[in-house]
Every structure is written in C-alpha cells, then in structure tokens.
Amino acid sequence: MRNVFAVARKDVLIEWRARLLLVRVLPFALLVLVLFAVALDSEALLTRAAAGLVWLAAMFATLLVVQRCFDIETADGALDMLLTSVVEPSRVFFGKVLAVAAQLLVLVVVLLGGAVVLYGVRIDAAGLVLLVTTVVTAVIGLASVGTLYGAVVAQLTGRDSLLPLLAMPVLAPLLIGASRATESAFGSQTIDLATGWAWTSLLAVFGVVFAAAGAASFATLTEPDA
Amino acid sequence: MSESMPARGASTLNLRGTSTPATRIIGVLALAVMTWVVVSAFFFTAPDVVQGDSVRIMYAHVPAAWVAYLAFVTTAIASGFSLVRRHRTLGFDRVAGASAEVGVLFMGLALVTGSLWGRLTWGTFWQWDPRLTTTLFLFITYVGYLAVRRIDASPERRAKRSAVLALLAVLEIPLVHFSVVLWRSLHQEASVLNPDGDVRLDGLMLFTLFSGVVAFTLAFVWLVIHRQRLQTLVDLQGTVGLDSALAARATEAVLR
Amino acid sequence: MIHLRDAVVAPAGFPALAGATLDVGAGELVALRGANGAGKTTLLRLCAGLAPLARGAASVLGVDLAGNRATVRRSVGFVGHRNGLYGELTARENIAFVATLVGATHDEVEVVLDGFGLAGRLADTRASALSAGQRRRTALASLAIRRARLWLLDEPHAALDVDSRQQLDRVFREATASGVTVVYTTHERYTDSQQMPRTITLDAGRVVHDHA
C-alpha cells in the first residue's frame, strides 16, 4: 500500500515540476469546449448538450494525460527498471491510476467551470451531491481504463494513434453514464435525480471492473521476455 | 521450450496449400447448405405480410450477426487458453487471431445488412438500438485488436498482448450493451425498431433461417481453420529449428 | 553467484546466446568483451532474469533461471544503455523513490549519495541537468540502495570522459570490496594491466576466452 502511494506521489511530483497539465492539457480541453460552441452554433443546443460535451472533452484530454503518464517512464527506461526489480506491477498500476485520477479531477472541475461560463449551465444545490459523486466515480473509471490501455500500447510504434482507437470504444459506457448523470445533476427535465443516481452506480461498477482488470493484467502486459 | 520449436501440426500441412480432407468436407458442406439457403430464401419462402420482399435480407443478416458473436466468443476462449497454458500458447493465439479476422468480416456483413434492412423497412440507414449499436462497438473493438496484432515482431509478445485485449473486450461488450439498453430506454421508443421484431416466421422461413445459421457457421469454421494454418506457416518462416540456428550461429564466429 | 552451462537464449528463434558456459563468484569484478552482436547484452539480461532460457542450465544467486526467473530480479540490478531515471526529479529524489519502495531509510540515502560522489549541490540537481557520468552514478546508486548483490551493467562507460570512467572504475572496486559482484560489458582497453579485471570474451554467442 505504501508503494502505491509512493508511485502516485512520484508521478504527481513529476507532473507538478513539468506543469504539462496546467500549460497544455487544460488549455486544450477548454479549447475543445470553445470549438464545440463554434461548431454547434446554437446556445440553446449547447446548454442542453453541455453535460455530454464536458465529458467528451474530458475523454480526449484523458488520452493526453495517460500518454504523458507513460512517456515519463519510457523516456529513460525507468518503468522497465521499476517493474523488474523492486515493486509489484499491480502496485505500480494503482499508483499510476491514482496520479492520473488526481489530474483528471482538476481537469473535470475546470471543464465544469467552463460549461458554467461558456454554455450557461446552472448548478443548483439539489444536484450538487450527485454531481460530485458522478465526477469522482467517472474520473476513477477514466483513469483505470486510460492507464490500462496506456500500458497496452506503451513502447509500441504508432501508439499515439492506437490509444484512442483502443480506449474510446471501451469508454463509451462511461461517456453515456457520466453524461446522463451530469445532465440530471444540471437539472434536466427528462432525467430525474433517481435515474441520475442509477447512472452513477453504473459508473462505479465500471470503475471497479476496470481497476480490477487493470491490476490483474498489468503484470502480463509489462513482463519482459527478451 | 516449446516456443522455439516448430509448431506442432506443421507436419500435417502439405506445402502446396493448407487443405486437408477434413477441411474439404467442411467446405463442400458449407457450399451445399449455402446454396440451399440462397435458393430457398429467394424462391421458396414467401414474402412477409408487412415488409414484403425486403424481409429476405434477414436470411443473411441474422446468421451473420450470430457468427459475429460466435467469433467473439471463440477469440475470447482461445485467448484465455493462450494466457493460461504454458504449451501450445501460440496455437491458441493463432486461432484467436484467425477467429477475429473472420469475425470482423461477418460483423461488417451484419452491420451492412442490418443497415440496408432498416433502410428498406423504416427508411433510415441506422437505428441506435442496442443490438446494432453493440455490434458496431464490437466491430470497432476488433479492428483495434487486429491493429495491435499487426505490430509485434515476436509471436510470443503478440500472443500475450492481444490475449489481454481480447479478454478485456469480454468485459467491455456486455457493459456497452447494458448501457446502450439503459440509454435508449430513456427515449421511450414505442417499439424497438428491429425489423425482425415484427416478422412472423412460418415453418419454411424458420427452417431456411436455421440452415442459414448452419451454413454461415460452417463457412466460419472453414475460414478460421485455413487462416490459422496460414498463420502457422507465416510464423514458421520466421523461425528455423533451434538446432539449425545454433549451427548457423557457430559459423559466425569472428575470432579464431 | 552465476553458473551457466551451455546456456542458450533465443528470443524469436535466433540464438543470441548459443551455448555459454561460465562461473562467477561473489565479490568478483568481471568485464565482458566481444564484438557487437556477440551476445553480451543477452548474457546480462539472462542473468538479470529478463530473458528466458531456451536450453542449457543457468543459476544466479542460487535461483534456477529455467524455473521462475522473476524471483531473481529483486536481488539483481540491471542497468542497460539507458539509466532509468526521471528527468524532472533530482538525484536525491530519484534515489529516495527507490529507497521508499525497498524500505531503506533517509540516512541510507544520504550515505549512498555520498559514496557515489553525488552529495551536496549534485544531490539537488534535476537528473536531466546532470552530466552523463553523474547520471550513470545515480543509476548505480539506485542499485546500491536496493542492496542488490549482483550488478549487471551494459556498457556503463559508454559516452563518458576519461575522468568519469575512472570514477566509475573506482566505484566498481569499492562495491566489489564490500561483497557485491559486478559484471559489465565494455569495449574498453586497459593500458594498466594491474587495473585489468577478469575478462571474459564472447564470440557468436559462446564464451571463447576467460582470463584474470
């Protein structure tokens, strides 16, 4: 358990020093929100679609965060050394998921702020608890799937184009669930809070399933055999 | 170590082709049943009361969808074995890969026929119903799986990586299906727009449909066996027997 | 420590190591030489538990490599062409990270930093700002903090200037004096025969010379 936090802390420390989240990923995510507005050209539509757009932008940004998460390891061969000497692969996986989730949390909060400002979304007290729960469970799911598939393609040539192809179909249920739950939290007419909570529980199941799957397969995916 | 020895069963392949008596029988059977299905579908069965002749697409669509999911299950099971077993790992991996390739073909066929059927019956090329949507996700997932398979140089690495992917797909697909079902239920569609939901099947139609499933399954098996054998030959090309490789290496000595 | 008998390593069919036989005892300093492609790196990776054994027998630190080679990795340190460092972390932080994973203390980290000439300003410099020689020593310091009993190093002297090389050699001698076994590959020539360690030469995947 201590090793999980050590890995997570190391990743967050590196990110803090490099500031890539702040300087590149957040601006990109906000840019995506702006581009949606330009493409859709209808404020009413934007407000209605806000929940889905926020999570879509979050998904794209997740790919960037995950790629960076593995780039720091492959730049100097650090992951190889780590995994083949001192620490169990599943601990490394959980540590990385924690670090990615922390960054995604910041990202999603900023995106929600962007939705309030750019899309005219209003968040009232009734939906706040649901919103917070949705964000936390969805972020864990995003981080687990992202880290897992990031490990699948790490060190492969052309991995930058592979990661989206592999990860995004898997994230579709998460996108559906997070968008519907967030819509409900924003006070939508068609989805009541009870349904919103149902979606959130689906998100929780999704997160647990892929966190477990990731921990189980990380060792196989990173096993050296040459 | 079995990994570096020639694949078992390689000796049964005559180098002019990948056929054996068994596959010839399967192939002939597949062809025969398929012919019956085509003839029956077009000439013997009656058009539907509501849909008219467009119902005949069902005889291609339903079996194709069935084989698509059969391929998915085959790849998953073969991948599971390839990860767990220490010997014959590569054999199972080849079956998994072959099944995925053939499966993608049938998934594409199911999607295209489903789309056409919808167009003819309801006027739109696509419905976001759970079955079609899940099949679409299955298709995309397997395209990604095949893309990953193409990269790895060594068969062992390829086997491990794609086996994990295939098993993850087993987790993913039910989740996708379930969430799409929930998602569409929000839209209170009066009838799920499945063309085959309203078709009334009489005895001959049912039998033709069933024969279609049999024919497509036989074709699937035939294709997978051949594809898997082809892959065995390809993999063999990359590895000479270890003994000859050792002898060749000895002649590379630079220092005397 | 290391016992190989006709060891064959053939990832993807090609026998990079084609029947190597050698014995290395504890506390020895061994230089592996040979042309490119002779199998030096593969030999190191086999002993590190990274490459699978195809034929023959191999045991490292009492662990049979034909069985579970993963268990030998904890006690063996392998440093390849790259150093395995995190550029944004300082030398001290890099070593402290490894220390946390193995349960070594803060004081041990300082001792190791000192022993590898990385104390003072260098300890707080980011790894990306260190020189090649300093990065190499940081990588080796990680092996030391892990208390690895066998060091397997692939061309540790490459891209280092003369002073750095001599520093590295000094580090090796100190390590072996304290009981660590060090095996490294090199293309170096030793002018001073008194300095020359036991040298094993590989050719076409086999051991052809072995003299102290």
Image (cartoon, coloured by chain):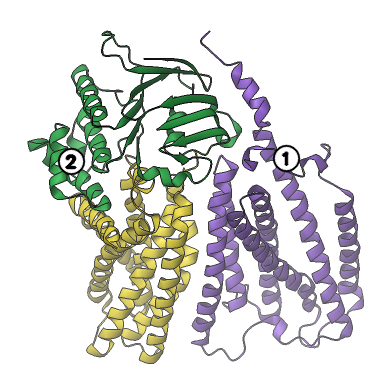
Chain colours: A yellow, B purple, C green
Do we see residue A41 in this rendering? no
Q: Residues within 10 Å of mark 1 (few under 14, many from 20)?
A: some
Q: How many marks?
A: 2
Residue assigned mark 2: C91
- Front residue of A171/C117: it is C117
Question: Looking at the picture, which amino acid does disc 2 mark?
Answer: Ala
Compared across the picture, whether B71 is left or right of B189 comes to right
Chain name for mark 1: B
- Front residue of A131/C154: it is C154
For image coordinates 63% across by 50% down, the residue present is B89
Mark 1 lies on a secondary structure that is helix
Compared across the picture, whether C121 is left or right of B100 comes to left
- Front residue of A99/C208: it is C208
Q: Position of residue C71 (x, y in %)?
A: 42, 47
Q: Position of residue B50 (x, y in %)?
A: 77, 87
Chain name for mark 2: C
Residue C85 position (above or below residue B87): above
Residue C95 lies in what quarter of the image? top left
